[in-house]
């Protein structure tokens, strides 16, 4: 684990530990299948074992970690078929959210999405931007688009997949070509939303998710 995970006296400490561990896992600081040792993590994070234990249990409940016999908690591994299944579910849920966004998005939602597109493009144009910043800009737009559906239960279901999908999404956005394509697709999604074109935004959402899946396998295969 990188030294940057060391944390200061921020409260509540259990939430800080959870966020630090989750970010480390999703950013690839740990390998799939890697065993996480509670005492080792506590020492590296400079905290007691109790908040680490609570964070690990929470990450297990979210499907980011899994328990293995005689090994304890490890970073969950996914087979190619499992990854495809997750993306199929994501496609279905996000397409439904997009359809309702076309019906329910407010002017405030549209203004926020426009701001996030501009922000995403500014991050992309800045040569000093780090991969994590690029990913976060894309993530903020996607989450705002889902929220503009004003379907909180549906949004909650999509958010429940975040832990499993984030690692794959980060990989799929590593290439400059895919980043540019994703930005273009986000702009197209916003334009379709402004026109309240439900059919177009659903099809664009499906294309966007499928493109991310193809980019992921293209990256890991390469």
Image (cartoon, rainbow, N blue to C red):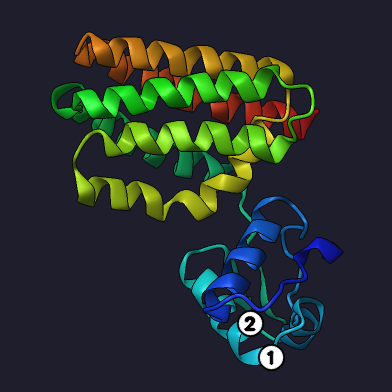
Quadrant placement of the N terminus: bottom right
Query: Could you tell me which residue is drawn at 50 percent across and 74 percent down?
Result: 58
> Where is residue 59, by image quadrant?
bottom right
Query: Could you tell me which residue is drawn at 29 percent across and 39 percent down?
Result: 147
Q: Which is more toward the observer, 78 or 155?
A: 155
Q: Are marks 2 and 1 in contact (CB under 8 Å)?
A: yes
Whether residue 169 is visible: yes
Residue 202 vs residue 105: left or right?
A: right
Q: Where is mark 1, residue-wise?
A: 48
Residue 202 at x, y percent in the picture? 29, 20
Q: Where is mark 2, residue-wise?
A: 52
Mark 1 secondary-structure assignment = loop
- In this picture, is 127 found above or below 187? below
Residue 75 at x, y percent in the picture? 67, 65
> Where is residue 114, by image quadrant?
top left
Residue 148 at x, y percent in the picture? 26, 33
Residue 203 at x, y percent in the picture? 33, 15
Q: Which is more toward the observer, 101 or 7?
A: 7
Residue 125 vs residue 187: left or right?
A: right
- Whole-angstrom CA distance, mark 2 to mark 1, is 7 Å
Query: Could you tell me which residue is drawn at 21 percent across and 51 percent down?
Result: 153
Residue 8 vs residue 51: left or right?
A: right
Whether residue 211 is visible: no
Quadrant placement of the C terminus: top right
Q: Which is more toward the observer, 87 or 7?
A: 7
The mark closer to the camera, 2 or 1, is 1
């Amino acid at each position: 684990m990188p030294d940057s995970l060391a944390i200061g006296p921020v409260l509540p400490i259990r939430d800080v530990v959870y966020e630090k561990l989750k970010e480390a896992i999703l950013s690839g600081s740990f390998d799939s299948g890697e065993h996480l040792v509670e005492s080792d993590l506590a020492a590296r994070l400079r905290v007691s074992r109790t908040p680490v234990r609570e964070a690990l249990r929470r990450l297990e409940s979210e499907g980011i970690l899994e328990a293995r016999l005689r090994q304890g908690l490890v970073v969950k591994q996914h087979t190619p078929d499992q990854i495809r299944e997750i993306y199929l579910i994501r496609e279905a849920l996000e397409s439904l959210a997009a359809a309702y966004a076309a019906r329910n998005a407010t002017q405030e939602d549209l203004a926020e999405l426009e701001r996030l597109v501009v922000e995403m493009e500014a991050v992309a144009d800045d040569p000093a931007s780090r991969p994590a910043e690029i990913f976060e800009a894309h993530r903020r737009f996607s989450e705002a688009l889902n929220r503009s559906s004003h379907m909180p239960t549906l949004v909650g279901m999509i958010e429940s997949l975040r832990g499993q999908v984030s690692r794959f999404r980060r990989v799929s956005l590593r290439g400059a070509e895919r980043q540019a394509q994703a930005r273009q697709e986000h702009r197209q999604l916003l334009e379709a939303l402004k026109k309240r074109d439900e059919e177009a935004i659903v099809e664009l959402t499906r294309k966007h998710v499928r493109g991310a899946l193809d980019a992921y396998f293209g990256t890991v295969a390469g």
